[in-house]
Image: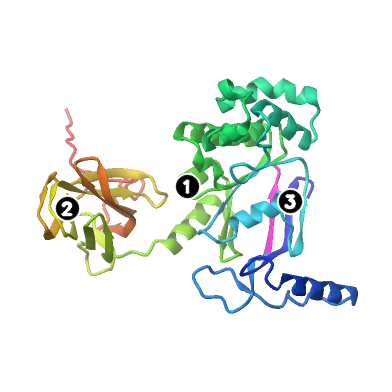
Amino acid sequence: MSNIVIKVENLSKQYRLGEVGTGSMRDDFKRFRYRMMGKDDPFLTIGEENNRNTQSQSDYVWALKDINFEVNQGDVVGVIGSNGAGKSTLLKILSRTTGPTTGSVKMKGRIASLLEVGTGFHAELSGRENIYLNGAIMGLRKHEVKAKLDEIIAFAGVERYIDTPVKRYSSGMYVRLAFAVAAHLEPDIMIVDEVLAVGDAEFQKKALGKMKDVSESDGRTVLFVSHNLLAVKSLCTSGILLHNGIIESFGKINQIIEKYTAANNKFSSFSIIKKEANSFTVHSITTSNNGIDGCFNIENKLEITIEVSSNKNHNSININLFFKTKEGTLIFATCSNTEEFEQGKATYTCIVPAKTLNDNVYIIDLMIVDNGENVILNIKDVLTIQGIEGKRIGSWLGKFPGLIRPQYFEWNKL
């Protein structure tokens, strides 16, 4: 029990829908009257689950409902789920920037949170002054912050602007400095939301490395929210899967990611898109299959057919396809020849050679480009397909590893 640093019991958070202030004074007075009479909150028995895709029938919604979990010291926990699942609300409660409606949160140690651009900094103060301010908020003495100052500035990479008011920083500079402060002032618990996505790729890599380092070397606890599942998988040891404000699963990060991707990847060999932009329309995209929707035999060629149309002529058009993993990592891209497009309808066919892909799940993006640089249409996650084998071909692992599986290699025994 002694190494448990976060304990969440029966945690729920209720919000009132609609315009802020509309009817809230009446509800607040009713809550106050019930409390004075020693009765339960009258609004705790109402409210709907946090499903953003349905029309509400109630004035209240449960952003979080009956959340229970424990986190040990040194754990790195990834919190994943769809937009609106309650991830940010949970982290705000753990960061104590908002309170729960019911339940309790017990945390041991100093907390550093990085929830959104602008959190914890005073816009009129310089970067240097904000470092000292944040240190004071975390309970550090001035000499303790000063000992870390040069390291923080170097990590953030904002030496030139450290004495400039942070209101003049770009969002990337802001996040760099905020993360450097949170990571280097030795918090016992570090809470990081999707805000790192604002930084460039180099900084994201450095930030992930730092979080891993403070966990493994210093025994710090990290809670990390991100839609980049590859980053979550590489950093975290365990995970929490949230759906509509409730915990669907809590356990090993690999199992949590598998459950999340399985629930969100709907295999389909045919998609009616009807997307229009800049005079162009994409009508549909179709893949060959084996009678199972969204599945294809990796031993056969894979044909992808795209139907498009335009109400005017174009000098040069090409169709681009991007193949990604479930985690969003780009595997490869391919494009049609750049050629003139005459007004009307046209069909493009892309053929992926047999024995190129593996028995994995692939997500496809579609992009149409004019004159080699002007993006006319960019459609994300247009298809999700599953590669399967007609017959099992053994390897030393029983299954060939890797994201792709090209077999056009020449082997010789001399």
* Residue 20 horizontal/vertical position (percent): 66, 65
Which one is nearer the viewer's eye here, 411 or 60? 60
- Badge 2 local density, few (<14 within 10 Å), some, or many (20+)? some
The quadrant in which residue 333 appears is top left
Say how many tags the image has.
3
- Secondary structure, mark 3, is loop
Real-space Cα separation, disc 1 to disc 3, in angstroms? 25 Å
The verdict on residue 70 being magenta is yes
Query: Residue 398 placed where, x, y %?
Result: 34, 50
Check contact, mark 1 vs mark 3: CB within 8 A: no
Residue at 73% x, 22% y is 146
Can residue 212 be seen here? The reply is no
Q: What secondary structure prevails in the magenta region?
A: strand
Q: Secondary structure at mark 2?
A: strand
Which residue carries the number 2 mark? Answer: 350
Q: Which residue is mark 3?
A: 96
Q: Position of residue 59 (x, y in %)?
A: 64, 75
Query: What amino acid is labelled 3 in the image?
Result: Arg
Q: Is residue 40 magenta?
A: no
Q: The disc labelled 1 sits on which kind of residue?
A: Asn
In-image side of 134 versus 409 (left or right)? right
The numbered mark at residue 186 is none
Q: Nearer the viewer, residue 16 or 85?
A: 16
Q: Is residue 165 left or right of residue 410?
A: right
Amino acid under disc 2: Cys
- Does any portion of residue 153 appear in the rendered image? yes
Residue at point 58% right, 79% down? 57
The residue indicated by pointer 1 is 228
Q: To which quarter of the image does residue 241 belong? A: bottom right
Residue 163, placed above or below residue 102: above
Which segment is the magenta one? 67-74
Q: Nearer the viewer, residue 409 or 176?
A: 176
